[in-house]
Amino acid sequence: MLKLSANLSTLMTSLPLAERWAQAAGAGFAAVEIQFPYEAGLAEIRRLRDTHRLPLALINVPAGDLMAGGAGLAAHPARIREFADALDTACRWTETLTVPAVNVLAGRLPAGVDPRHAMDTLCDNLALAAARLADAGARCTFEAINRYDMPGFLIDSTAAMLAVQERVGHANLWWQYDVYHMARMGEDVLADLAAYWPRIGHLQFADTPARGAPGSGDFPFGKLWPLIAQLPYPFYSGAEYRSTADGFKWFHALSQIDFHQRN
């Protein structure tokens, strides 16, 4: 199923958040997603959701210093309490806003920490998050991020996602599969989606190599759209490319795609 959401953290970043939400609604997206909505405040996010009748499909658990170049929280043995507090915050937002999926960012290997210890910590925290978010009514996802955009990120391949998911072994732990990140890592994205779609709790996409809108680079979106449409995958696919303003030409052109073609 091809059900598209707009990531308001990366799209139309020259506009205030309220205008981005309105633009996404006007363009015809089925939902929006925001990486870290917490600074805007719970009441304001709920107001925007209700005003535009456009649900919030995905948020991230707060990730500490990750976006500023630090290790983040989820794999840091010295920040287990901080991660638990961040998870509490995400669960409260999830329950209040009825968010169906919440992403846990694995983070970078902390300085001075044995990689095995970091991975043990990550898996313990993912097990906790999967259980807590199940109680909150949301899928818990985690993702692989390419090593060029975020050097040192602990999870950077399909094989790594598979290993972590199987090690944690919780029914509510899903992949957030990002087409852009996996294409940058040389993964066979179309084969991955065909083989692993039952493990995927959220999809995201951008073109390669510059993380622009579909059609701006070299990724074969003409094959991707029909594949997603034909799969029994039931969740959202999020547009997470970078733009300061956006006419969504690629989105409007989807009506010209033959979704019945075989790949």
Image (tube, helix red, strand yellow):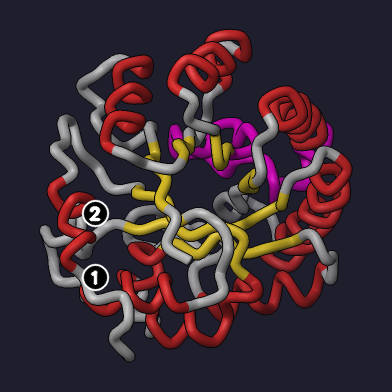
Which residue: 44% across, 43% down? 30
257 left or right of 4 in image: left
Q: Earlier in the sequence, mark 2 or mark 1?
A: 2
The reply to whether discs 2 and 1 touch (Cβ–Cβ < 8 Å) is: no
Secondary structure beneath disc 2? Answer: loop
Mark 2, mark 1: which one is toward the viewer?
1
126 left or right of 215 in image: right
Q: Amino acid at mark 1?
A: Phe
99 left or right of 252 in image: right
196 left or right of 260 in image: right
Which residue: 59% across, 39% down? 60
Which residue: 38% across, 78% down? 227
The extreme bottom residue here reads: 262
Is-magenta flag for residue 73? yes
Vertical arrangement, residue 243 with respect to residue 218, above or below: above
The residue under label 2 is 211
Which residue: 68% across, 63% down? 174
Please give the label number shown on residue 50. none
Quadrant of the rendered image containing residue 23: top left
Quadrant of the rendered image containing residue 169: bottom right
Relative image position of residue 239 (x, y in whole percent): 35, 49
Secondary structure beneath disc 1? Answer: helix
Vertical arrangement, residue 44 with respect to residue 218, above or below: above
Nearer to me, 254 or 181: 254
* Whether residue 82 can be seen here: no
Relative image position of residue 251 (x, y in whole percent): 23, 51
Q: Which residues are magenta?
A: 60-82
Relative image position of residue 124 (x, y in whole percent): 84, 56
Is-magenta flag for residue 214? no
* Whether residue 180 can be seen here: yes
Please give the label number shown on residue 221. 1
Nearer to me, 163 or 21: 21
